[in-house]
Amino acid sequence: MTLSTAACAVLLWLASLATALHAAAVDAKLWKTYCDDAKKAVQERRDQEADQFIGMAVGAAESFGEADPRLVETLFMAAGLQQARKRFADAETHLRRALAVREARLGTNHLSVAECVFHLGNNLSDQKKFTEAEPFLKRAEHIAKWKTSAYHPTVGTCQAALARNYSLAGRYDQADKLYTAALKILGTQTSTTKFKGGPDMIEERLFVPDYRRVMQIRMEQAQTLHLGKKHKDAEDAFKKLVKLIEDREGKDSVLLVNPLLAFGLHCADVKKYPAAETLLLRRQGIITEHAGPKHPAHLATKAALERVYREQGKDAEADLLARQLSEAGVKPDAAK
C-alpha cells in the first residue's frame, strides 16, 4: 500500500511537471510571437497595433520573472522600438525598469548595469533633459573605467555620449574636450594583454577602430566647434573628417554627402563663399553619381547654394535655384 501511494505521488508530480513545462513552452512561444509582431507593426507604421504588441511582449516577459534574461531583453527591445518612433518618454519607462531589474540582481556597479545607465542617459539627452542625463552618462563612464581600464573602447563610447549631451546643452568647450578624449581611444588600434590566473592563461585582444563610428564622432566634434564659434578649429576638424573618409572609402564616397553639406554651411557662415561653393558642388556631383539628378538630397544642396550665391551677389544663379526650390515646395532659406 505504501509503495502504491508513493508511486501515485511520483506520477502526479511528473504530470504536474509536464503540465508546467508545456505551459512554459506555450508562454515562450507567445512571447516570441508578440516580440516579432511588435517589430513588424513598428516597421509597417501600424502604431496602435505596435503599442498593443509591445505591451503584450513586456507582459509576457514579466511573467518569466526578474531572474529570466528575457525580461531585460524585451525591455530593451521595447525601448528601441519606441525610440525609433521618437516616443522617448515611453522608451524611458522601459529603460528605467530594465535598470531596476539589473541593479536588483547584479548590484550597482556591474557592466550590464552600466549598459542600462548608458542607454537611459542617451534617452534623456534625446528628450533634451541634459541636466538629468549627465549623471547617468558619467556613471556609465565611471563603471566602465572601474571594470575595464581608462582606455577601454567602452570608456570612449561613454565619453562620446557625454560629449554629445554637453554639445546639445550648449556646453561646447566641455564637449570638445570629451570628443578629443573619446577619439584618442576609439580612433586608435590597440592591443591589450589580460592575465587570467597563470602563465599559460594570457589573452591577447586587438581592438580595431570602427571607422564609421569615428567618422560620426568627428562630425559631431566639428559641428560643436562651429557652434562654439571656434571657426579655425572647426575648419580643421571638418578637413580631418573629409580626409578620413577619402582615405578609407574614396573621394566619391556617399559617406561624404553629409560632411560636405555641414562643411559647406560652415564656410558660408564664416563668409568663405568660394570654398563653400566648391564643397556644395562636390556634394551635388556625388549625389548625382550615386542616386541620379532627381534625388531629394539635391534640395538641401540647392538651398545651401542659393544662400551662398545670394550672399555673394550672384542673383541670377540664386534666382534660378530659388525657382527650382519653390517648385519643389522648399523655402529658399531652408539652409540658413
Image (cartoon, rainbow, N blue to C red):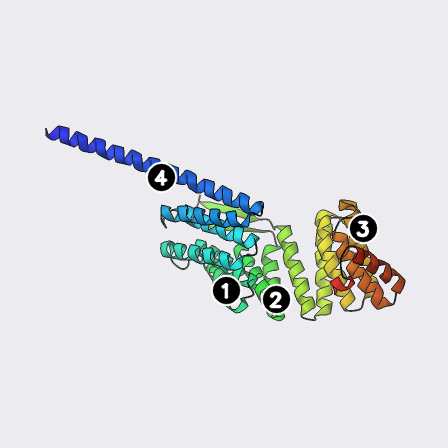
Secondary structure at badge 2 equals: helix
Point out the tag, 2 or 3, that comes first from the N-terminus.
2
Alpha-carbon distance for marks 2 and 4? 48 Å
| Disc 1 to disc 4: CB gap under 8 Å | no
In the image, what residue occupies the spot 61% across and 50% down? 210
Which residue corresponds to mark 3?
285
Which residue corresponds to mark 1?
138
How many other residues sit within 10 Å of disc 3, few (<14), some (14-19) or many (≥20)?
some
Q: Nearer the viewer, mark 1 or mark 3?
A: 3
The answer to which of 173 and 325 lies nearer the viewer is 325
Q: Nearer the viewer, mark 1 or mark 4?
A: 4
| Disc 2 to disc 4: CB gap under 8 Å | no
What's under tag 1, amino acid-wise?
Lys
Q: How many marks?
A: 4
Which residue corresponds to mark 4?
24
In the visual, does 279 lie left or right of 144?
A: right
Which residue corresponds to mark 2?
167
In the image, what residue occupies the spot 89% across and 62% down? 316
Q: Quadrant of the C terminus?
A: bottom right
Secondary structure at badge 1 equals: helix
Alpha-carbon distance for marks 1 and 4? 40 Å
Q: Quadrant of residue 327?
A: bottom right
Secondary structure at badge 3 equals: helix
Alpha-carbon distance for marks 2 and 3? 31 Å
Q: Quadrant of residue 169?
A: bottom right
Point out the tag, 1 or 4, that comes first from the N-terminus.
4
Point out the tag, 1 or 3, that comes first from the N-terminus.
1
**Residue 303 in view:** yes
What's under tag 2, amino acid-wise?
Ser
In the visual, does 206 lie left or right of 7?
A: right
How many other residues sit within 10 Å of disc 1, few (<14), some (14-19) or many (≥20)?
some
What's under tag 3, amino acid-wise?
Gly
